[in-house]
Amino acid sequence: ALRDALIDVLRSACAVGPARKVVLRGTGPNFCSGGDLTEFGTCNDTTFAHLIRTARAPGLLLHRLGNRATAHVHGACIGAGTELPTFCSHVSAHPDTTFQLPETSMGLIPGAGGTVSVTRRIGRQRTMWFATTGAAIDASIALSWGLIDTVSEVQQ
């Protein structure tokens, strides 16, 4: 439901044109804990499941928004919570932020576009290590790698 609502907002922002800016933020203690694991494997037709994920991909819309999309993240950014902000032109993180791509430990690959968006920001070697180890990194490492652009306690 959250992904579908995000898609609706991003499609509207794309349709409005250059005047519309989008800032991704989360509420609660974490920006995003990743995909809903209860959804994984529930579709009997894997082709149909892939088509749904492809048609409902917020990363493509964030990419289309270009420099009109920014993100301010905090707390845990897991899976899609790491992948989607990296499509934005500017990512600011609270100092308490951690980033993690745990998909491979579940037999998956980052599926919210991170193999593209994360790689563009930090390069192939770091993305490979990040995705295959499932290790969490903090905001200072993310900043030094270029995964994020600034560390700030104030949402921008």
Image (cartoon, rainbow, N blue to C red):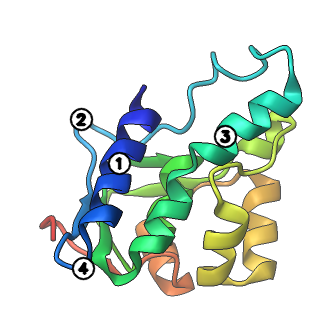
The residue that label 3 is drawn on is 53
- Seen from the viewer's position, the closer of residues 97 and 32 is 32
**Which quarter of the picture shows residue 23?**
bottom left
Callout 2 environment at 10 Å: few (<14), some (14 to 19), or many (20+)?
Answer: few
Instruction: Find residue 11 and report its horizontal and vertical position in percent.
Output: 38, 54
Q: Residue at the spot x=81%, y=39% of the render?
A: 105
Q: CA distance from mark 2 to mark 3?
A: 26 Å
- Marks 2 and 1 close (CB-CB < 8 Å): yes
Callout 1 environment at 10 Å: few (<14), some (14 to 19), or many (20+)?
Answer: many
Precedes in sequence: disc 4 or disc 1: 4
Q: Secondary structure at mark 2?
A: loop
Residue 137 visible within the image: no
Q: Amino acid at mark 4?
A: Pro
Observer-side mark, 2 or 4, equals 4
Q: CA distance from mark 4 to mark 3?
A: 26 Å
The residue that label 2 is drawn on is 28
